[in-house]
Image (cartoon, rainbow, N blue to C red):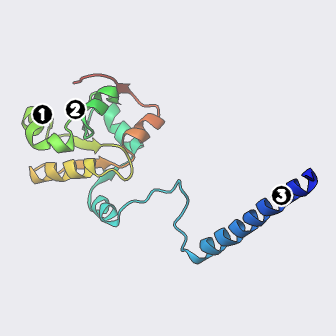
Amino acid sequence: MNLNRTWRSVFMTAAGIYMVSLVLGLSVHSATPDKGTADSLNVPESYVQEIQAMKTISVEDAYSNYTSNTAVFVDTRDNAEYREGHIKGAINIPYDKFQQDYPKFKSLLLKNKKIITYCHGTGCGLSVDVAKDLGKRGFTDVYVMTEGWPGWINANLPIAVGREP
């Protein structure tokens, strides 16, 4: 048995498979529309429209309200995520428990302060939904911090862990 002939055969087969795969991959890629990179966020158009209809606030402006104590922060993520970390002083009203938890926190939602809702960041609609529900209850100065918890963390702003307030 000639090993050189066997290795040459294996190499030629592998090279042939590689070339066919390359040509096939390039053909499929050129025939399909560009859908962005794997890192790009696919945000539903309905969410974009809802956000555009809401008042939004940047992390920087939210922090300015935080330091001047002119806003109440509402974390709309679930209780477990809130306990793992949240904006210091934020109250936790998860969207899925809004109807039952709202009466407990109603007295903390002051009409003379901004209410800033947040959740998992861009693409998360929980804060939008809670902001809409607050609007239905007569609150007019409600903002959605679209960068959410990730934006606050990335800016190294004050956080707390555990149950609060």
Q: Which residue is mark 2?
A: 91
From this viewpoint, which residue is outermost toward the left? 103
* Category of crowding for the residue at label 1, using alpha-carbon neighbours closer than 10 angstroms: few (below 14), some (14–19), many (at least 20): few
Q: Nearer the viewer, mark 3 or mark 1?
A: 3
Residue 106 placement: quadrant: top left
Secondary element at image label 3: helix
Query: Whole-percent x and y of residue 79?
Result: 24, 32
- Residue located at (29% from left, 52% from top): 125
Residue 105 is marked as 1
- Between 37 and 93, the one lying in front of the other is 37
Q: Are marks 2 and 1 in contact (CB under 8 Å)?
A: yes
Q: Is residue 104 above or below residue 125?
A: above
Screen quadrant of the C terminus:
top left
Query: Closer to the N terminus: mark 3 or mark 1?
Result: 3
Q: Which residue is mark 3?
A: 11
The residue under label 3 is which amino acid type? Phe
- Residue located at (30% from left, 58% from top): 51
Is residue 93 found left or right of 138 in the rendered image? right
Secondary element at image label 1: helix
Secondary element at image label 2: strand
Q: Is residue 50 above or below residue 69?
A: below
Q: CA distance from mark 3 to mark 2?
A: 64 Å
Is residue 98 found left or right of 58 in the rendered image? left
- Residue located at (9% from left, 49% from top): 137
- Residue located at (45% from left, 56% from top): 41
The residue under label 1 is which amino acid type? Phe
Q: CA distance from mark 3 to mark 1?
A: 70 Å
Q: Are marks 3 and 1 in contact (CB under 8 Å)?
A: no
